[in-house]
Structure formats: structure tokens, C-alpha cells
Image: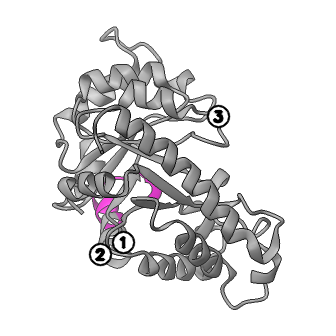
Amino acid sequence: MDLNHIINHIRVKKSCLCVGLDPDLNRIPDHLLDGDDPVFEFNKSIIDATSDLCVAYKPNLAFYEKLGPAGLVSLEKTIRYISDDHFIIADAKRSDIFNSAKMYADTFYNYFNCDAVTLSPYMGFDAVKPFLKKGKWAILLIATSNPSASSIQNIITQSGSPLYLDILDNAAAWSNKENMMFVVGATRTKEMRKIRAKAPENFFLIPGIGAQGGDLAAVFDAGFSKNCGLLINVSRSIIYAGEGLGKNFKDHVHQACLSMQQNMESLLKSRNFVV
């Protein structure tokens, strides 16, 4: 999916929501656990309840790899079930030497048919290059939402800048807004403003809204660009909104997703991005 398609979907759906598909067997409704593939059935229910309100899905590979070969089968079935008008992000956080990175890129782009992969940029350009395909997206971890991230990412380097900005400066020479995004946590709005100043047109993938305590309005204030420039991921507070409520869980998932979409619509309208 190219940049124009992403922007158009945001305008049409009045939403920049990415739903994280992080299935935990300990939290999946009991009535699904007796099926042949409870992970896929859960994901299918989530997709059915949210597809009209979001523009992207982000399966986190950890939740599938934990289950071994069966988990990867569930992942493949899930990705195939998602419609073509949704941006699909493999949250894999990969990084390796060129030959290995190429194998990862082939896996997620050619086998699983994902649009994007999250990557650690700390091994440099050769670890990122295989993911820079036309119509595909490398999403680099720059300022993440986990509590201890700043203890490494904000180290002041010989340049006098924090490490995350040095990484950003390097990445600017690797590609452009057409196939590179940056992960910037919703809890890192101070850093987000500095990153947006250096990358005015790149999209940001924003984790940390919801369960991690990030504020949606603050994210818009710090990171919004002329093309919106935001894909805001929400996982647990949407997919487990119906936890413990049995077969009616999908209604609660839909309502949680609708509430988030409506908040996004209001913020997009306030910036004259949608009408």
C-alpha cells in the first residue's frame, strides 16, 4: 500500500487507528478455546468488529511465535482474512546482517504479504535496506514507549544530540516518506516534537495509547502533520474490552473501537483534515 492510499483511507474512515492483534490464550473468551484454532477465531472476531473503524492492523509476532508452528498458521490465516484496504504491519522488531535481513523481508512481504515490518535500526543501513521495497514500508524503532527506553535512546552522543536523533539523521539518508515510518511512543511526546521537526512528512506508528497511558490529544499536538502522519496503535484496551463477557465480547470490542475512532475524528476535524 502506497502513501496516497494510506492518506486516503484515513480521510475516508476519519480514523488513523491501527488495531494491534495480540492474542493471549489466557484472555481469549472461553467459548473459543474448544475450537481448532482459537487464536484465529478470536482475531477474526476482532477484525469483524473493528474493520470499518480502523485503517491498519498490527499483529505482534511474539504472540504467535510463542505458540510454535500452530501460531504461525494462525498468523497466516489472520493476515489472509484482513481486507486489502487495510495496512498490515508485522510487528516483528527484526534486525540482522544483510543476508539474514533479506530472508526476513522475503518472509513478511512475499509469504505473509504484509505491507510493513517494524525494525531495529541499530545495526545500520544494511540491516534495513532489504525492507525498502516499492509499496512496502520499513518502520524504524526510534523513541519507544517502554518505561526504560530513554535510558538508552536519550544518551547524549559525541554529536551533542540524543542517540534517537542521531539514528533519525542517519535514517534520513536511507529512504524517504514513501516507504519509511518511525515508531514513536505516545508516552514520549517531548521526543515526538523533536522527531517531527526533523521528519515533517514521515508517518509515525504510535504505540502507548490506552493500557500504557498515552494521551491521544497530546499525540496529535506533538506529531500531527499536513498528511496526518499518524498511525495510532491500540491493542489491549480494544481487543480485550469484552474480556469476561462471554459470547457478547464483540459488541464491547466494537464500542471501544468506535469510541477511539470518534475521538480521532474529532481531532482530525479540528485540524481540517476531514470534514
Q: How is the protein colored in the picture?
A: one colour
Q: Is residue 100 above or below residue 129?
A: below
Residue at image coords 63%, 42%: 210
Foreground label between 2 and 3:
3
Q: Secondary structure at mark 1?
A: helix
Say which quarter of the image contains residue 89.
bottom left
Q: Is residue 261 left or right of residue 71?
A: left
Q: Disc 2 vs disc 1: Cβ atoms closer than 8 Å? A: yes
Residue 92 is one of the magenta-drawn residues = yes
Counting from the top left corner in percent of width and height, residue 17 is at 45, 51
In front of the other: 45 or 164: 45
Q: Is residue 56 left or right of residue 168?
A: right
Q: Does the rendering let one see residue 122?
A: no
Magenta stretch in the rendered image: 91-104
Query: Label 3 to label 1, Cα distance in Å?
Result: 33 Å
> Circle 1 is placed at which residue position?
107
Question: Which mark is on residue 110?
Answer: 2
Name the image quarter holding the N terminus: bottom left
Crowding at mark 3 (Cα within 10 Å: few <14, some 14-19, many 20+): few
Question: Which mark is on residue 213?
Answer: 3
Counting from the top left corner in percent of width and height, residue 58 is at 48, 59
In front of the other: 84 or 199: 84
Name the image quarter holding the C terminus: top left
The three-letter amino acid code for the residue at tag 2 is Asn
Extreme residue in the bottom direction: 36
The three-letter amino acid code for the residue at tag 1 is Thr
